[in-house]
Amino acid sequence: MFSSILKKKLTADQVATIFVNGICDVINRGFEPVVDCINDDPSFVKSPEIVKNNIDEFALIVITANLIEMERLTDATTGVHTLNLAIEKLAEIYGIEAMDMRQIVQDYRQFMKRVNLPSKTTLYAMSKAIFHKYELNDFQDEYFKRMNAPNPVFLKRLDEMLVNFLWNWDSFYRKYRF
């Protein structure tokens, strides 16, 4: 009972701002180590040599995954409002209209859903989306290349890195209420 009284109350706008700033920060700080791990992964016959300024696909995958999780883990009324505010803030960062940002997120959502079938786990969708968006199949050994499927060992390592890019809503709810 007392823990809910001591929690700081936030508006949907404040939550969206914290969320967007946090996600952008983790993307900017975390992309380079992820690229280094992918480029050096022993599962590849040849290094993919992803350049460290090729962050756009990664950022959109992480943003989309986190918006999927926000929608899934928040209540309908507050969650939708916060989601819309987050999309507006992201559109502002990208210098585009909110409707365009919404469409980009929807396109990525559909892509992630398609490459992740039959699984519905957001983390797996992130890893598979990165695999396909960065065309990593071209760097695999012949067996996995012919299957056009990621090496499961590589995918597991990527999952272990990407879990750090998903917003921790449980921790957030323990500290704040809105």
Image (cartoon, helix red, strand yellow):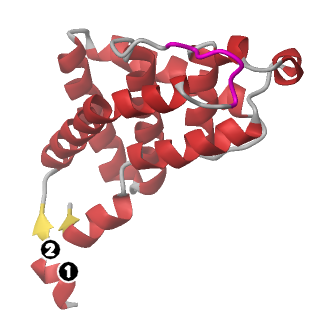
- Tell me, yes or no, whether the highlighted magenta stretch contains residue 6: no
Mark 2 crowd level (few <14, some 14–19, many ≥20, 10 Å Cα): some
- Specify start and end residues of the magenta stretch as a single range: 43-49
Of residues 91 and 99, the one drawn nearer to the viewer in this rendering = 91
Please tell me whether mark 2 sits on a helix, a strand or a loop. loop
Mark identifier at residue 4: 1
Give the residue pinned by disc 2.
7
The answer to whether 160 is drawn above or below residue 52 in the figure is below
Report the disc number at residue 155. none
Q: Amino acid at mark 1?
A: Ser
Label 2 vs label 1: CA separation? Answer: 5 Å
Q: Residue at x 18, y 18 (%)?
A: 92
- Percent of width and height locating residue 126: 55, 34
Quadrant housing residue 54: top left
Residue 110 visible in image = no
Q: Quadrant of residue 2?
A: bottom left
Q: Position of residue 93 (x, y in %)?
A: 19, 19
Q: Amino acid at mark 2?
A: Lys
User: Measured along the vertical axis of the image, is residue 46 above or below residue 90?
Assistant: above
Secondary structure beneath label 1 = helix
Left or right position of 133 against 22: right
What's the residue at 19%, 84% (across, down)?
3
Of the 4 image quadrants, the one containing the N terminus is bottom left
Does the CB distance between marks 2 and 1 fall below 8 Å? yes
- Residue 47 in the magenta stretch? The answer is yes
